[in-house]
Amino acid sequence: MVLANLAKVPRIPELRRRLLFTLAMLAVYRIGVFITTPGVNRNAMKSVVASKGSGLIGMFNLFSGGAVENLSIFALGIMPYISMSIIMSLLGMVYKPIEELRKEGEQGRRKLDQYTRMGTVVLAAFQAFGVATTLEGMTGELGEVVGKPGLSFRLMTILTLTTGTAFLMWVGEQITERGISNGTSLLIFAGIITDIPNAIGNYLQQNKGNVQPLTVATVALVIAVTVGTIAFFERAQRRIPIVTSRRQVGKRIYGGQQAHLPLKVNVAGTIPPIFASSLLAFPATLAQFKVPGMNAVQDFINRGDWVFNTFYTLLIIFFCFFYTAVTFQAVDVADNLKKQQANIPGIRPGKQTAEYIDRVLTRITFGGALYVAAVCVIPQIIFNALRVPSLARFGGTSIMIVVGVALETVNQIDVQLTTNKYEDIGTGATPKLSGRRQVTV
């Protein structure tokens, strides 16, 4: 069914335009990944990343599609934008003016987006300054990373990297508005996908004549099980029954219909692992600004053993609950049901409905948070135990982002196809709506 729907894409002008625009934007992003920042020795930088590729540097190099090892104009990637989004979300919970803006609808959302963009530029400039000062003292196996350090190099690096992040932020927003799926997620998705051939090539090169079939089979099995688990949970729902009240208008009786309120097991999607990864990199950013004690914190977290996995798991669980609380307001849902004269059987409208929905959502979010944490951490532990560092980069976090973005993209294509089928009613065509199977929990 999925392949059949994808085959229909070229025949729908609107969907075809959106798809071509998305591919064009991703192509521009991939071209920029190979444009090195002025004054940087790319080969020396690659050797540095290769020697530290098993920690956070390797993770962000993966998310950026190799932009870090090339020290390209997109080396900071989209992470400053994600970090600023986290900061704005946190401020919305403690700073009343931001909370009021969020309630103003479309106009308030635009103002918040503008503040997020401005904050992203400022944060990217600070991070670019830290990167520039760090690069000046960095030496790899192939020599110094920066040939001519100094004020001119720092200013040029700050301008280049900040502009690159601002451009990626614009690209992501354009894809979201005029393309298919979420632009920010697609940029990370593209970076991970394009690095797969390099990882396979590195593994074969490191194990010339000694490729172990059992290890390869185990890695393939872990990936297959992880993909299946993600696909199952991402489509799982808890359906709350809803009944509309009967009312009589003239001689006709309206209402009395049964429906359901679907609550996803994982409301946050791929946001928690991305947020957690961004937050774990924050000590490294502070260390670049010579903040006392941050180097020790960075080394402690960057070890990649149980310490990193413990912090990573706790942050994922936290962001699952946090993002769900920010994006899903049980009080608003209960108010909307009351206005529509709908109610949950056995539950009074209003406050009791909101409390019931919140209680159900908390339970399923707990299960969803454990699922996300397990998927992101367990495959990584297995890959490290198998001692396949070139493939360990593609742990559960990468797999979840790839599968989650792919599912979201397919869903949006289905929505466009369904909309087109409804429009065909006016031309005499018979719409054939093909629903996707949902897992009810």
Image (cartoon, grey):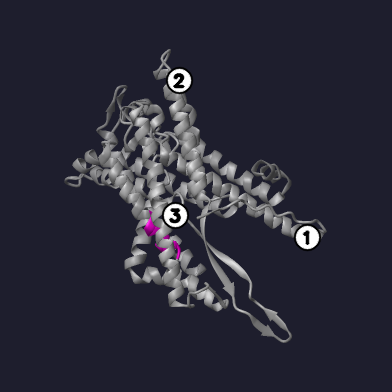
User: Is residue 179 visible to the viewer in this orientation of the structure?
Assistant: no
Distance between the Cα atoms at labels 1 and 3?
35 Å
Tag 2 residue: 213
Tag 1 residue: 425
Q: Residue at x 80, y 56 (%)?
A: 429
Q: Amino acid at mark 2?
A: Pro
Q: Residue at x 50, y 55 (%)?
A: 441
* Residue 209 x, y percent position in the rendering: 43, 12
Indicate whether 183 appears above or below 138: below
Helix, strand or loop under label 3:
loop
Magenta stretch: dominant SS? helix
Dot label at residue 268: 3
Distance between the Cα atoms at labels 2 and 1?
55 Å
Q: Which residue appears farthest toward the top when viewing the image?
A: 209
Is residue 327 found left or right of 96 in the rendered image? right
* Residue 168 x, y percent position in the rendering: 47, 46
The residue range painted magenta reads 320-328
* Residue 109 x, y percent position in the rendering: 47, 65
Q: Amino acid at mark 3?
A: Ala
Q: Quadrant of residue 213?
A: top left
Q: Which one is earlier in the sequence, the residue at label 1 or at label 3?
A: 3
Is residue 428 found left or right of 438 in the rendered image? right
Q: Magenta stretch: residue 325 in it?
A: yes
Question: From the viewer's perspective, is the residue at label 2 or at label 1 nearer?
Answer: 2
Distance between the Cα atoms at labels 3 and 2?
37 Å
